[in-house]
Each structure stands twice: as C-alpha cells, then as structure tokens.
Amino acid sequence: MTPRALMFEVAMRALYPLLLAASLWLLLRGHNAPGGGFVGGLVAVSASAAYAIAFGARRARLRMPLGPPALAAAGVLMALASGLPAALLGLPFLTHLWTTLPLGVVDLPLSTVMLFDLGVYCCVWAAVGGYCLELLGAQEHNT
Amino acid sequence: MIGPAVAATGELAPATPSARRLLGYAALPLTLFAALVAALASVPLPWSVHAAWVPSLGVDLAFHVDGLAAQMLLLICGVGSLVFIYAAGYLAGTPRGGRALLLLSLFLLAMIGAVSADNLLLLFVFWELTSVLSFLLVGFSHEQEKSRKSAQQALLVTGGGGLFLLAGFLLLGDLANTWSIRELIAAAPHLVDEPLLPLALGLVFVGTFTKSAQFPFHFWLPNAMAAPTPVSAYLHSATMVKLGIYLLARLDPAFGQLLLWDVVLVAVGSITALWGALHTLRERDLKRILAWSTVASLGTLTMLVGLPNPAAALAVASFLFAHALYKAPLFFVVGNLDHGAGTRSIDHLTGMRRYMPWTAAAAALAALSMAGLPLSFGFVAKDVITAAKAEAELVALAGHAAVIVGAVSVAVAAVASLHVFWGRDNASRDAHPHEAPWTMLLPPLALALLGLLFGIMPATVDPLLAQAAQAMAPELGAVTVEASYDAAPVLTALALTLLFGGAIYAFWDGLHRTLERASWLDAYGPAAWYQRKLQALSHIAAWHTRLLQHGLLDRYLLTVLAVVTAVALLALFLSAGRWQWPAAQGVSLPLAAAGAIAVAGALATLRARDRFVLLLASGLVGYGCAALFLFAGAPDLAFTQFAVETVFVVVAAAVLPEIRGRRAAAPALPPPARIEPLKLLVAVAFGTTLSLFLLRAAGLPFDTALSEFFGANSVPVAHGHNVVNVIIVDFRALDTLGEIAVVAFALLAASPLFKLARVGRGGTP
C-alpha cells in the first residue's frame, strides 16, 4: 500500500458526496444554464478519481451505483429509451415530450429530455470514470 | 454482427448436445420444404414479392422465383432437410454441435435469399452472407490449425471474389440503369456495344468463379473439406458452390449470345473439369477425392452454361439436380465411414460391406447415378448433356474434357462403392468398424433412392426441369427430358466412359503413384501462388508495422502533426479564398490574462525537466484555454474543459510515479530538455498553419442561419434556455446518442487490455 494521507482521506469522506451533489446540480440546471450531462458526468468522474486516490480504486468502484460497464450500458439504454415514447406516438425518434407535474405551489416541468441527459451523465461517469479507475488501480496492484 | 450473436447463442446451448436435441433444428428446413412443395403444387410460377428497403439507392427487397430459382430452392430445402437430420446424428456429442446447426440454419436462409433475390445488391448481400457462414462452418473445429487455415482461405477467396462481383454488379447496374435482374436481362440487348461491358462481365466472372471453385480459384474447395461432413455435403457440394453457376445461368439469357461469354465459360469450365479430374486421381482421402470430383462437376456445369445452344439449358438443370442427388449421399457415406471405421483413407477401407451394410447400399445406389448407368437419374442427365453437346459445335478441348470427366466419375463411383465396400477385407484398422445410427443412414438412402426413382420415372421431375431450363433459355419452348432421348449416341458415349472409367479404376493405384510423383503440380499450381502471396502479405504487414508502430509516443505525435500540417497547407494553397486580418477589437483584461496563462504554460513545458512539472505546466495551458472560453462567451465549453483538464491532471499525476517506478534503472531525472531541430520545425509549422487557417476563416462571411435558428427555437420548441445543451440533448440528440455509445464502447474495448496488463503483472484479474 502507498502511505496513507490522513487529511486527504478525511476530506474526501465529505468531499465525495459534495462533488456528486454538485455534479447532479450541474446536470439538472443544464437545460437553462451552463451545465448538462457531459459536464455533470465529468465532475462525477473527478469525484470518483479523487476518492480512488484516497481509498483505492476498488472502493471507489464500489461506491458507484453499478459496475462501470453496466452503468455505461445503462446510460446508453436510458438515452435510447427516452426516444421511444415519441416513436410509439408516431413522432420522429428522440422527439422529446414535455409535461408538467402540479405540486400545489409550483408546477414541475418533466420531460423525456431529463432521462436522456441522465443517460449521458451515467455513460460519461461510468466510461471515463471506469477508465480512470483502471489506470489508478493498476498502480495499486504493482506496489 | 453474426459472429458475436452466434457466439452468444452457442454459449447458451449445452456444450455437448444429444442427437435428439439437435434434431429439433431440422424442423426449419422440413417446414420450408413442405411449404415449398405445397406452394409449387398449387401456385403457378413465377412468384414475386416486392417491398421498398432503401428506395433512395434503388435497393429493394425484391424477390422473384422462377423455374431456375424454384429448382435451387428445392435443392436447398430438400437436401437441407436431410443434411440437418444427418448433422444431428453426426454432431451428437460433439462440443458446440448446436452452434454448427445454428450456423447451418442461417446459411439455409441466406441461400434462400440469394437464389430468390431479384435485386443485384440484395443478391450480393446474401451472397456474402453465405461466404461468411461458410467461413464459420469450415472453421468449426477451430482447435486445429488446418481448419483455421482452410477457413481463412475459403473466406479470402470467396469473400474477395465477392468484392469483384460487387464491382461488376455496380458497373452492370450503372450501364443498364437498374438494379433489378429481370430489367437487366431485358435491357441486355442494348448493352452489347457498351465498351465497359466486357469489364463488368469480367468482374462478375471472377466473383462467380471464386464461389463455384473454377480454375484458378478452385483450390479452396478441397481444403474446405476440413469442415464437418454434413457441412461439406451441403455447402461445398449441393448448394453454395452452385451459387456461382446459378448466377451465370441466371444471366445467361442476357449475355449468352456474346462470344466473350461463351468462350470464357467453355474454356474455364473445361480447364476446371480437367484439372479437377486430374487431381481426383492424386488423392487417397475419400472425402478429398469427392471434393476434387465436385470441382470437375462444377467445371462441367460452367461449360454447359457457356454452350450457346438452348438445349444446354436443359442439361444444366438436369445435371444440377443429378449432381446433388448423388454427390451429397456419397459425402454422407464418407461421413459414416469416418464415423464407423475411423478413417477416410481408401488404403485402409476395403470390404466394409460386412460391417456397414446400409451405408454400402446407399453408396452403391449413389454410385450408379454418378457413373451414369441406365435406370438412374445420372443416366438421364448424361443423356441430356450428350444431346446438348452433340448440338453445339464444340471446341475439341470441351469435348475431350467431358469424356475424361465422365470416365473419372465412373472411376470415383467405383472406388466409393466397389473398392471400399465390396473388396476383400484385408486392410489393417485400429477400430472395429460399426454401422452408423439411423439419422446418418436415412439421408443418404433417401437421396440415392430419389436419384433412382427420378431415373426410372423422369416424368416426375420433367415439368420442373423444363421450367428451370426455360428460365435460362426463354426461346427453348416446352421441352421434356424424355423428348430429348436419342438412344444411339447416348449408348455410345456411355460405353466409352464406362470403358475408360473401368480402365482408370483398374489402374487407379498406378495412376496415383505416377501423379503423386508430379510434384511440380504442387509447386506451381494456383494453390502455391496463393500461399506465396499470403506470406508476402504478412511480410509487408510486418515491415510496415515495424516502420510505423515503433511505440515511441513522441514520434507518433511528430508523425501525426507533420501529416496534418502538410495536408492542411496543401488544402490552404489549393483552395481559393482571401486572407483577412481580423478587425481590431479592444481586448478585455480577463481575456488577455487567460491568454497569458496559456502561453506561460506552453513556455514552461519547454523548460521543464521533471515530468511532474511538465504535467502541471501542460495543465496550465488547458486551464488558460478554459478561461479564454469562459470570457469569450462559451461557459459550457469552459466548464467541460475545466473538468477534463482536472481529471486528466489528477489521474496522470497519480499514475506518473508508476511509470517512474518501472524505469528504476533509468536516471532519476530525465535528460535535460533539449530542443531538437526537427521537432521545433514541425511544431512551428503546425502553429503557423493553424494561424493561417484562422486568417483564411476570418475572410469568409459568417453564416448566421444556424445560430439564428437555434436561438429562435430553443425556448419555444425545446423548452430550454441553454442553447448548447438543447442542441446536445434535443436538436442533435441522435448524434449524442451515437457519441455516448462510442464512449461506452471505448470502455469495453479498453477493459480487456487492462485485464491483460493486470495478469501480466501477476495481479488478480
């Protein structure tokens, strides 16, 4: 094992959820302000990479919702699925549909776009993150 | 796409399936065969189906079944049914037996598509599918190097020939201005004077000759005998190798009157027939003997297609049928011998009748037909062939070839039945021979009996053969096999071939020894040429891999940048346009600061000696650029750049010690940074070229149509204020879907490499 950096580990415990929250926030605001699935996914990657440097690639991989290949595949499938409702309605594939969910005080707009962007987010996080974790993990095995 | 799918399904099936389980696959050809026979009995030919597929390219799902196609369909489904039953017995207990039957099923469907397609490009798709499936089936026993080599050879020859065929189809389609085969045939009289027609036909010839194993492309067929026996009987005797003949016959009404067509087909067919007959005598392996005699038969068929008189069409149809009815059972017989006695060498096979009576019966019946003895369908076919040749003014070569091939067929038939089954049992064998199970006896017996039945009552198949012949030669009118009966010349020819054949059989061993000594045949034949070319190819590949793939990162970068610079400069100077210095704008302080950071980072990389510092300095360039984007009004781009740069620097920094550690023997510090003149030159040239590009771009008027469209439609259509994101997830969502799929695939492609690296270092995979 590489020598442990205690301060970094302690900081990462708190930073990891914060970074993920930030990445989700980027994902959600993306439609109207700078952000989106790609950037959000990349921020999530940086969270995973930092976590791996602190605790090892294996533990970082375990903290992802699915294994990287499965998560990447799930992302692509989510993006694919977001286009299907339109296709079923006879519209061109990937025409996004919108609806609003009344919540009493405010109306929450919902769309298949969200599923699509979530797919992009998951795919980028899993694919780029998986790649980085493999690189970082390779180092662990050697020492 | 087929490969992985088949691999996946193959893994799902049990590893060593039982015969009963494999018999289930036979339901497909049996159902198709029953449907086909019922349809032939009730619906008059021709049948047509048409559906648009890629209308913009003129590629339609157009199918047209006439007499010729119907005959092929009967062979494909009828022989197919028996092959599937046989394969169930033959492959029972063989690892991955289910995969072979699955591949055979796919092959069956591809063949049906190929012979019923009425669109040149559609036909080509099915044609190549059969080549690919043949590759997978020949390489079924992929643990053996011989199998792998034969499979590769079959694919390279037939698949490569397929590309020639595609080129020929494209030319033909362009000349005739249609992709429909029927329209092409109708338009053919107007194409005669086209200067490109000989080229188009030449390309089609290469395609069909590779597929149907014509000289000089024939050598893949005997080697393809590495496949399991049912595969050989089905693909490499009854159906796939006939596909080339089928296409030639299909195009015969269009080009049959051309001298080029007749000369090439008769010459190549005759040479192939002779070459095949000659090599038949050089073999001791019964399966290879049959393969070479198949080559000879295919040559005869090609020659018959080339004969200009309409009566030859009937001969093609009859011989196509007869050949399938006697050659497939003989292959089955060889499979039974291999299975029951453990050898295919005729040196070790004599008197097998005592152990395998039913197989012996099937062999005898099939041999009757192959030798063309009276009361067999082979006799009928031989009769029609003799009649066709008598009518045509034959070149001497073709005439002699036919006689010799006929004689060799008689000899092969005698070897396969008399020598193997009826001789004295004095050969030394290891295993005690035993008879095959019913699944492996029914197919050869059924086919051989059918051959006899049709021989006694040719009227049963007459309408079908006549219709097939008319598809090849529309001017033929109503003919019947019986009508062309003329006893005297037929019996003379029969006597001649029997006499010669008997002589060859009697002196088989002596002939074999003589021919085996003729080693120049091996040294200079087309097979040797193929071998040399294949080796040359791998030498060239090795040479240019050594040249280009040196594994030095800086050289790769140097090559890429130099090539990009050269191409870009060429494009710049070839294109018309004007240079324009961008109008002076007030540069804001943040922009200038961002630029300065990037430049400082770039300069620092020149001076840095430590890899860590180098990494950070290059990261600085990225951050500088990101800041530049941010202040130039592209916050999304800036965010992405920041994130990418951060992840890269962090991961690279974590991995760097690893690289250092592995070069423990190297000095702790890399050598002092030196500026190499060549690299400096390329770097400066690259930078200058990019700047020139910008100057040129500034001289072009800026088209605002797209940005105006997105600006105007982003909120009302896509409900989003962030135009960049709206483009990514909505307007161009399909592109994004493709991109993330590529990103996911990149991970999948990289993970085996990582796994390999882990194993290499002794870590846990």
Image (cartoon, coloured by chain):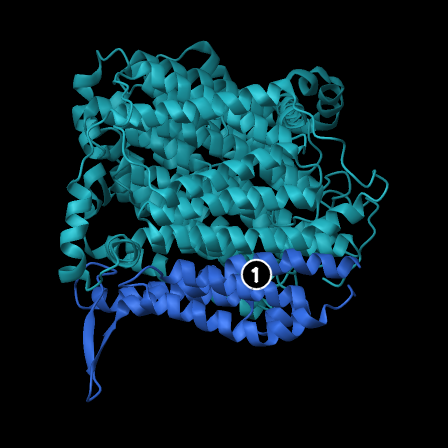
Residue drawn at the location 48% of the way across and 12% of the way down? B397
Q: Is residue B430 left or right of residue B415?
A: right
Residue B653 in the image: above or below residue B253: below
At numbered mark 1, what does the secondary structure look like: helix, strand or loop? helix
Counting from the top left corner in percent of width and height, residue B32 is at 35, 58
Counting from the top left corner in percent of width and height, residue A14 is at 57, 76
Specify the amino acid type for callout 1.
Answer: Gly
Quarter of the image with the C terminus of chain A is bottom right
Q: Residue furthest bottom?
A: A104
Residue B270 in the image: above or below residue B62: above
Q: Residue furthest right?
A: B665
Foreground of the two, A33 or B21 = A33
Q: Is residue B435 left or right of residue B178?
A: right
Quarter of the image with the N terminus of chain A is bottom right
Foreground of the two, B12 or B215 = B12
Q: Colour of chain B?
A: cyan
- Tell me which corner region of the image, top left, top right, bottom left or bottom right, holds residue A78: bottom left
Counting from the top left corner in percent of width and height, residue B362 is at 57, 50
Foreground of the two, B735 or B691 = B691
- Tell me which corner region of the image, top left, top right, bottom left or bottom right, holds residue B409: top right
Residue drawn at the location 37% of the way across and 66% of the way down? A27
Residue drawn at the location 19% of the way across and 78% of the way down? A100
Counting from the top left corner in percent of width and height, residue B95 is at 65, 61
Q: State how many labels appear.
A: 1
Chain (blue) = A
- Tell me which corner region of the image, top left, top right, bottom left or bottom right, holds residue A30: bottom left
Q: Is residue B389 visible?
A: no
Residue highlighted by disc 1 = A130
Residue drawn at the location 37% of the way across and 43% of the way down? B589
Residue B385 in the image: above or below residue A121: above
Say which chain tag 1 marks: A
